Amino acid sequence: LTRQGIPAAITEAYPARVGFQAGFLVPVNSTATRDILIGGFLDYSSTGGRVHYADYSGEVRNDHILSAYSIGTTLSGRIRNLKPLTLDFGLGARLVISKFKNEFSSTIGTSTNNLVLDFSSTGVGFEPGIAPSVSIFGANLGATVSYMFYIPTRLNSDQFKDAYLTFNRGGEVTIDWSGPRLGVIVGYDL
């Protein structure tokens, strides 16, 4: 965009957005004060960015939409003798499928040009965390605090075989979902 005389800035990191996770935990070993649980989960996350410029002659827009779909497993330890609080410590491992859509659109007068480039990536992540909760009428309400350690992977083109996304001055563009995660728990004990 800057080669065309349009002022633009490069964004290195996208803002956090709300994601969703659904899962289950099954006790494999229990005592009066603690449980060991295993489980699985499905997860969805997304983020994005936009470069946009408009004036009297038209507009230029570049949207970047990034989403991730995960499937994983969890090993968790639960401390139950902190009444009314229950405290879970866990470690999750996940397979992450990332999708990146780069939509470019320009309108000059009555002429509009659109270009969509799709990229994808598959990687793995590990996530230790802690989750305090309280039980109210059989429902668990609480919060989660965790950190995702993700092994960065490059973005491969979905349209062109053996093509991948690179920076202007060279080097592969990679996806890295590493970072802190905060969540709200709404669960039910069977």
Image (tube, rainbow, N blue to C red):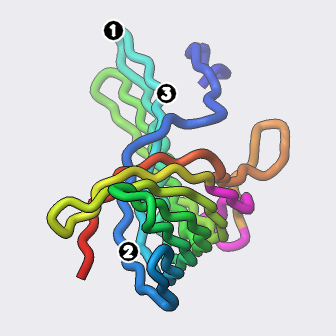
Q: Disc count in the image? A: 3
In terms of sequence position, does the residue under pointer 2 or pointer 3 come before the other? 2
How much space separates mark 1 and mark 2, taking CA atoms? Answer: 51 Å
Q: Is residue 124 left or right of residue 104?
A: right
Residue type at tag 2: Gly
Nearest to the eye among marks 1 and 2: give it: 2
Asked which secondary structure carries label 2, the reply is strand
Q: Is residue 158 magenta?
A: yes
Instruction: Magenta stretch: give its range.
Output: 148-162
Q: Is residue 55 magenta?
A: no
Who is closer to the viewer here, 87 or 176?
87
How much space separates mark 3 and mark 1, taking CA atoms? Answer: 18 Å
In terms of sequence position, does the residue under pointer 1 or pointer 2 come before the other? 2
Who is closer to the viewer here, 47 or 157?
47
Q: Which residue is mark 1?
A: 56
Residue type at tag 1: Tyr
Q: Position of residue 97 (x, y in %)?
A: 54, 69
Nearest to the eye among marks 3 and 1: give it: 3
Q: Residue at x 56, y 53 (%)?
A: 146
Q: Return the mark for residue 23.
A: 2
Residue type at tag 3: Val
Nearest to the eye among marks 2 and 3: give it: 2
